Image (cartoon, rainbow, N blue to C red):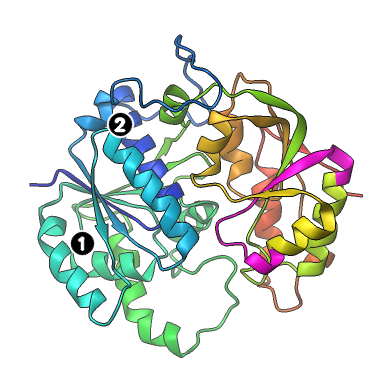
């Protein structure tokens, strides 16, 4: 019997599954959101990961199997393979599922996962908005569900669950197209399976400020596993910028975004731009040519990259999950994390009406970051 079965589709989801397993084994009870346990006594040289130390026993004995529902995007697949190897090094069972490759992949995946899903004592979900995960949960509803952080979408998931709304990503415009109408029954069933009810408990494991929906438990993710296994980092003299995929998701105008990056780099003396894995090659080329920044495509989630170092003494980001997670990952290192809000005039005309308010909330609730005045 598989005690705990996790489904992930991104590197950050897999990282947070490892954080959940670590926190569950070592802390037992839910931690206070924002609490940071003492730093480990042992120190490593800057940038060194933990392969020289024994695997984390809390993960090796967690009874956890992680199923990677592999995306098609090459950058995501590359990061996921690196994260999968890290998880295996820690003693976690990882199964790579090419769930989107070729005809019949969906049916094959459902057949292969039906047995483990029925046997699982707990199912951990990385993306409750994923149509794939919704289909799986609709067919085989678990009795215990944990939703781990999948970026700022966790905030929207908790809010929609509390309001009893259908699950829709925050950057999607209102109205249902033909595809959404076809998939509406799947989403409806999945929403019920992701909500607490008779014989079913729901936990949200997050670094973000989330109000617990009625009947759910919210457990703090303070990135303790990341801090115990990596770093502390060596700090550089300058600043680093963190990229975002807001242009690619149709929220921010590309020219306005490039102007903002140029001003931030000049103002804060930044030399590097850490790209989001979904940023397009064309946009990154423009940033490199027009700003002179060194564009870095990380091969692991940024929390691990920053913790391993070297990293700037100041990290500047637009509103995203990292303005909440990086201060936790880098606590005690002297690194300052700053957030630059998205100005209304940067938004595309067809951006979701919820975009401005949602992004302002992401920045405004990041209490461990510095707020920047753009100009």
Percent position of residue 193, x then y = 28, 62
Q: Position of residue 159 (x, y in %)?
A: 51, 56
Q: How many marks?
A: 2
Give yes or no for residue 281 being in the magenta stretch: yes
List the residue tagged with mark 2. 24
Q: Does residue 209 lie above or below 50 as drawn?
A: below
Left or right: 306 with respect to 77? right
Q: Is residue 122 magenta?
A: no
- 197 displayed left or right of 31: left
Look at the image and give the residue range highlighted in magenta: 266-283
Is 244 or 143 nearer to us in this picture? 244
Query: Which residue is at 22% across, 31% downward?
Result: 60
Residue sitting at x 38%, y 35%: 19
Q: Residue at x 50, y 87 (%)?
A: 177
Residue bearing the label numbered 1: 141
Q: At x 33% / y 46%, what residue is drawn?
A: 84
Asked if 126 appears above or below 286 in the picture, the reply is above
- Whether residue 147 is visible here, answered yes or no, is yes
Instruction: Identify the element where label 2 is drawn.
Output: helix
Q: Quadrant of residue 178?
A: bottom left
């Amino acid at each position: 019997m598989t005690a705990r079965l996790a489904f992930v589709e991104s590197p950050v989801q897999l990282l947070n599954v490892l954080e959940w397993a670590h926190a569950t084994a070592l802390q037992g009870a839910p931690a206070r959101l924002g609490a940071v346990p003492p730093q480990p006594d042992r120190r490593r040289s800057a940038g060194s990961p933990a392969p020289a130390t024994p695997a984390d026993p809390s993960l090796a004995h967690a009874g956890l199997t992680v199923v990677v529902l592999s995306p098609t995007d090459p950058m995501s697949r590359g990061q996921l393979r690196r994260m999968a190897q890290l998880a295996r090094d820690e003693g976690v069972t990882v199964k790579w599922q090419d769930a989107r490759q070729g005809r019949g992949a969906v049916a094959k995946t459902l057949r292969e996962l039906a047995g483990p899903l029925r046997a699982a004592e707990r199912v951990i979900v990385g993306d409750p908005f994923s149509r794939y995960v919704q289909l799986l949960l609709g067919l085989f509803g678990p009795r215990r569900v944990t939703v781990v952080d999948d970026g700022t979408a966790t905030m929207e998931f908790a809010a929609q669950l509390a309001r009893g709304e259908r699950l829709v990503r925050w950057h999607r415009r209102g109205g249902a197209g033909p595809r959404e109408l076809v998939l509406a029954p799947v989403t409806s069933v999945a929403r019920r399976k992701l909500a607490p009810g008779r014989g079913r408990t729901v936990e949200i494991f997050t670094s973000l400020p989330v109000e617990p929906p009625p009947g759910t438990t919210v457990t703090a993710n303070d990135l303790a596993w990341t801090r115990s296994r990596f770093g502390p980092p060596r700090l550089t003299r300058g600043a680093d910028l963190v990229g975002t995929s807001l242009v690619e998701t149709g929220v921010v105008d590309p020219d306005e975004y490039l102007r903002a990056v140029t001003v931030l780099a000049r103002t804060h003396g930044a030399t590097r731009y850490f790209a989001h894995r979904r940023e397009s090659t064309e946009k990154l080329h423009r940033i490199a040519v027009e700003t002179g920044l060194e564009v870095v495509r990380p091969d692991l989630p940024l929390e691990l990259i920053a913790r391993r170092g070297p990293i700037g003494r100041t990290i500047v980001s637009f509103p995203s999950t990292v303005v909440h997670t990086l201060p936790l990952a880098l606590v005690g290192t002297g690194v300052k994390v700053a957030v630059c809000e998205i100005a209304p005039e940067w938004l595309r005309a067809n951006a979701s009406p919820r975009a401005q308010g949602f992004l302002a909330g992401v920045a405004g609730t990041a209490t461990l970051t510095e707020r920047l005045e753009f100009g």
